[in-house]
Every structure is written in structure tokens, then in C-alpha cells.
Image: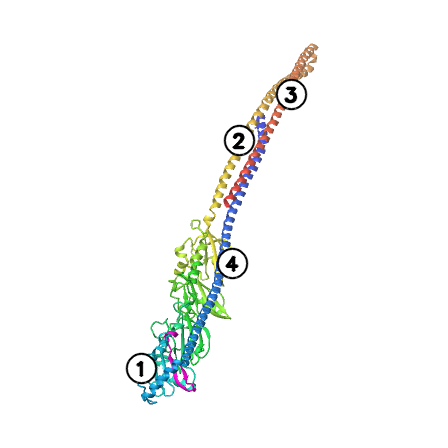
Amino acid sequence: MKMKLSTKLIATYLGVGLVPLALIGAISWKVASGGLGTVSTQGSDALEAAAYDQLKAMREIKQKQVDQYFAERQGDMQVLVENVKAINANAWANLAGIQETKKQLITKLMSEMRSQLETLGRSRVTSQAFADFKAYHEASGATPEGTLDVSSEAYKAVYDEWYEDFAPYVKQLGYYDVFFICAAHGHVLFTEAKESDLGVNVRTGPLRGEGLGQLWKMVVDSRKTRVVDFAPYSPSNGDQAAFMGTPVFDDDGKMVVVVALQLPTDSINAAVQSRAGLGKSGETYLVGKSGAKTSFRSDMLTMGDGKYVVGAEIQTDYISKAIAGESGQKIFFDSAGNPVMVCYEPLEIEGLNWAQVTKMDMEECFSLKAEGEAEDFFTKYNAAYGYYDLFLCHPNGYCFYSVCHEADYRTNLVNGKYAASALGHAVQTSLAGKAFAFGDFAPYAPSNGAPAAFIAQPVISNGRADMVVALQLSDAAIGSMMASGSSKDKTLEAYLVGPDGYMRSDSVLHPEDYSIAASFAMANKVDTEAVRDAMNGGTDAKVITDYLGSQVLSAWAPLDIFGVKWALICEIDEAVAMAAKAEMAQASAGVNRMLVTWVVGGLVIVGVVVTFLAWSIARSISKPLNRIIAGLTEGSQQVAAASGQVSSASQSLAEGATEQAAGLEETSSSLEEMSSMTKQNADNAQQANALAGEARKAADTGSESMGRMNRAIQDIQKSSDETAKIIKVIDEIAFQTNLLALNAAV
């Protein structure tokens, strides 16, 4: 079936117009969809990378925070150790200063007593009084071995005459008693107190073995001032009594009397019992050794039961050393097992083997409060730096100071019931290495079983540990540090895990089961790929299953906490992290559909326009051509009819040729008829010529139509340019979408 000319023209024009349009549309479709797909993919990748970058940044920040936190704790410990060392030195200096002050006081007191006694012995009043007492002694008839009668009126007269001269030694100078003792016989001629020793012969009587009798003999034998140490004295109700005596000579140098003073315990106590700078537990006291017995020479005030008073026996290592002539400063343990700082040294008092001791509980030495303040330095330090507790321990492990005074206070952390605790581990490790040590989190009984971690460091002097300082870390401080930046709503958290798999900070997402306390109490370990890799020293970030069984984006790194491995984990739920990526993909798909709609719509509109223009142009060309073809067809039919007539005439001519014999007339008539037909042919030829002219006009019209078609194609080109502009707008929209996606990712 032959195709009509108009159909061919329409098909040709549609091919010319729509094929480029289809190519442009296909290119536009590919550019639009491909560009948006690239934008969508790039945006999604950027959002995913941003989520990982956020976790990595959080991991780096937390790692620095944790490292800085523990570095600051070690720095705090260094500062604290220096403070403890200074406090320790000041405590010893304070004790030594008090010790020296008391030593000077007691030495001066004894020196003044000797001076006062010797002044009394050289006094003319003493010589004159002795002359009267001697006269009475001779007149009384007392035998050298007997007792002097001191009940007679004659004696009372002599006594009363001289009483006011010697009584001031007791009433004003504070002595217990003053004595005149006959150097020759040993009779006690005078006492201010008038106890049972008055009139007794100390040479032969019952007092010869007691202090006063011993003193008389020592002075008579040495002819010098002598002192007898404290011992029970029966005339004074068996109380402790010490005596100092000096000889009195006449003008011929003969010893005639011994003047003696019974030393006052009150004056001696007053010299050493001042509590200034010694707090509640500190005290200075005197000890002495007489024979094989070592006993107090002053009363102790800190022992309020009245047991440790003058004459009470006492025996300690440092007292033995001091009595033996040694001086020193050392920490000893008292009867209650508490460490005591002790300064000890001998006293240089002629005739006495005395020593002085100044001591103070070690705890109080380190917990003295400034005037007007309710808290000591360590309590304030503990609160200011956010620690749970602060401990001071003796080198043997005994904890003598604690801010909180929990059950670990006054226990031994080396061999006591808490030796296996984290605090015990830290103290023992620091003592063994003489360096900073760390005790990792573990349930700690003294703190009600709550997990606790500790740091400890010894105070080193001259290569030896004087004590150990320990701090109980606050898990609240670590938890607050790790919770900063976390968000339960966003499922974002950072947490720490120890080598035992238990939490070292509280979970933000599930604190009821995965706080530090709950993790230990409920044995809830965190055993994830992140923890295992971090414990092996790995650092990474990827999607894993967390301790709650959820898919999460996780970033982890190892931590070295003073030789103990911890894991630092930063995580966010994958669904939450990728939500923005999904939203962007959805938005990109919507934009893609919109752009495709615009492209398809534009192509359809342009196709319709091109089709209409092709149809119009084809019609304008095909109509004249159809008319020309119709005219040519009609002429050709006429030519065909004439040709038939010529053929018929030729046949007749042939027949006539055969019938020439019939006559020339017939031939002539035939020629005439033939001439007529030739003329008719000529007319037909002219008519064909006219038809050819019309065909030429139709061709000219076709040429004009082709010009119009050319202009239509130019219009199509303009439409293509407009389509390119539309595509450019689409590209700009894609670029803006990319910027919006990046902004959303930021």
C-alpha cells in the first residue's frame, strides 16, 4: 500500500523535529536523574561520614578529658604529698620547739631551786637560827641516836622565833617543805610543815632509807649540794617526794647543818604541762630512773584516770632510749595502737637521771585547725577537689587519718581486713615501689559496698617512706565528665569499661542496669566487639551490636589508667544516626520525580508543537502538489486517449495501404482526417505545456513551503535552546539541593 505524499511529508517533518527533541529529552532525563542521583548519593555519604566524624570527635574529646582528669588527679596527689611533707616537717618542728621550750623551763626551774637553796644556806639568818636550835638540842639532852623532843615549850619558843624567816620558802616560793638537819647527829631541827619527820634522827631513825635520810648522808659525805629523786615519803602520807640539800659551814669551815627543800611537784608540773600548740592529745612529761625503776616525774593530763602521775612506773622504747642518754624523733604506737609522734631527750640536771618526752597523736598533728575554722586542711582539700575521702597511713599500713571515718579508719591496709581491697592494693603498691599507685574500681565494703577507686603515693624522706597519702576518687566526677555531651533522646552516649567488663561510668541510656554500681552489683558485663578490640589496643569506628543488643555506630579507643587498661566507647543508634540520610534520600527522590515530570511535560508540549507544525507544513505543501498531480493525471489520460486514436488511425492507414487500390480519394480523406488529428495533438501538447507551467508554479509554492519549514526548524532550535535553559535551571536546582544537604549534614 502506497503512502500518501502528505503522510510522507508529515513523517519526514516529525522525524526532523522530534528525533532531535527526543535526543535532547533523553539527554536531559539522564542529566537530571543522574545528577540528582549523584547529589543524593554524595549527600547520603556525607551524612554518614558526618555521623562517624561526630562520634570520632566525641571519642577524641572524651579521651583527652579522661587523660586530663587522671593527670590532674596525679597532679593533685603530688601537691598533696608536698603539703603532707610540709605539715609533717612543721609537726616535728612544732614538737621539737615545744620540747626545747619545756626543757629550758624545767632546767631553769631546777637551777633556780638550787640557787635559792644555796642562798638560804649561806644566809646569816640560817646560821643564827641554827645556833638557837643547836643550843636547844644540847640543852634537851637528846642522844645522837635518839629523837629530839619537839613538843616542849622551849622548842616551840625557838621554832616560833624563826618560823617567819623560813616560812616564805613554802608560802611564797612554792616548796613543799624546808628543813634544818643537824650535820653531826642527823636530827631534824626544823620543818615548816611539822610532819612526822620533825625531830626524827635521819641518820639512825626510820627515815634513814627514805629520801630525806639519803639526802642528809649524801650532803654530809660530799659536803656539796645534792638532790634525791622522787620516791614515796612516809611523813607525807607516802606521796612522792624529792629533796635538795646544801651544807652550812661555821666560821671554822665545819659543817654544822644541812638545809634542805622538799621539791614541789606543782612547780615541776607547771613547767611542763602547758598545752599550747599540742591540741587535745599532745603533752610534755618527765620521766626518771631511780635504781631499776623508771617512773613519771610529772603528771600526765591526757590520761585523765589519774594513773600516769609522778611515781607511776612507765616503760617504752623511746623512754628507755632517753634515760640512756639518747635524743630522737620517731613515730611510736601507744597502748591503743595509734601512732604517736614523739620527741625524746635526756635532761642535764645534776644528780638526776631524768628525761623529757613531748608527744602528740599523729592524726591530730595532721588535722590541726586554724583558729576560728571548723575544718582541718585535709577536710577542706577533700571537699574543694571533689574527692570522696582522704587517707593518711603509717608506713606499716595503719590508717591513722580519714576524712569520712568509715570502717577503714584505724585499720591496717597492709595486713588488716581491708588489705585485699582497692585501697589496700594502692597503698601496698605505692609502698613497694615508693611511687604513685592506682587501685581500680571494685566493690568497697567500708563505703557500703559501692565500687570505689583509689590513688596513693608515699611521702619519701631520705629514701624512706614516712607515710602514705591516699585519695578515694569520686565516681560522680567521672560520671559527670562522661555524661557531658551525651543525650538519651538522641541515643548518643560515651562510657568507660574496665578490664573486668564492668562499667567505669554510668550509662546514659540504661543507668538502672549499667551504672557503675549496678554493673558490679548485678554482674552486668559489657562484652562487645568495641570493648574487646579496645582492650587489645585497637581504635576503630563502625556499626556493631552494643551491650543492649541494638545496632549502633560505635567509635572506641583504649585508655591506659596508670597501667590499668580501660575502654572508651562512644555510640549512637544506627537508625537515629542514619535518619537524616533517609530523609535526604526521600527528599532527593521527590525532587527527582518533580524534575522528571517537568522534563516529560516539556517534551510532550514541544512534541505536540512540533507535530502540529509538521502537520501544518505538510498540508500546505501537499495540497498544491495534489492539485498538480491531479492535472497531470488528467493530461496523461487525454494523451493516452489521443495515442489510442493515433493507434486506431495507424491501423486504418495500414488497412488503407492494403486497400490503396480502392482509391486515392479515400487516401486523401484519410490524410485530411490525419491532419485534423495532428492539429488536435498540437492542442493537447499546448495544454500539457500549460499544465507543466502550473506544475512549476506548484514547485515554487513547495519551495516557499520549504522556507517556511526551515523557519519552523529554526523555531524548533529556539525551543531546544529554551529546553537547554530549563535543563540549566534543573542543574541549578540540583546544586542548591546539594548545598542544602551539606548544610543539613553540618
Magenta-drawn segment: 244-268
Instruction: Measuring from the top left, give residue 640's x and y in whole percent.
Output: 63, 19
Can you tell which of label 2 and label 4 is closer to the viewer?
4
Can you tell which of label 2 and label 3 is closer to the viewer?
2
Instruction: Measuring from the top left, give residue 443's x and y in whole percent.
Output: 40, 63
Q: Is residue 15 left or right of residue 326?
A: right
Comes first in the chain, label 2 or label 3: 2
Q: Amino acid at mark 3?
A: Arg
Q: Amino acid at mark 2?
A: Ile
Residue 574 seen in the figure? yes
- In this view, 235 is above or below 521: below
Return the mark for residue 605: 2
In depth, the one of 375 and 299 nearer the eye is: 299
Which type of secondary structure does the marked residue at label 3 adopt? Answer: helix
Which type of secondary structure does the marked residue at label 4 adopt? Answer: loop
Query: Disc 1 to disc 3, how far (Cα)?
Result: 191 Å
Comes first in the chain, label 2 or label 4: 4
Comes first in the chain, label 2 or label 1: 1
Can you tell which of label 2 and label 1 is closer to the viewer?
1
**Which residue in the structure is indicated by mark 4?**
538
Query: Disc 2 to disc 1, how far (Cα)?
Result: 157 Å
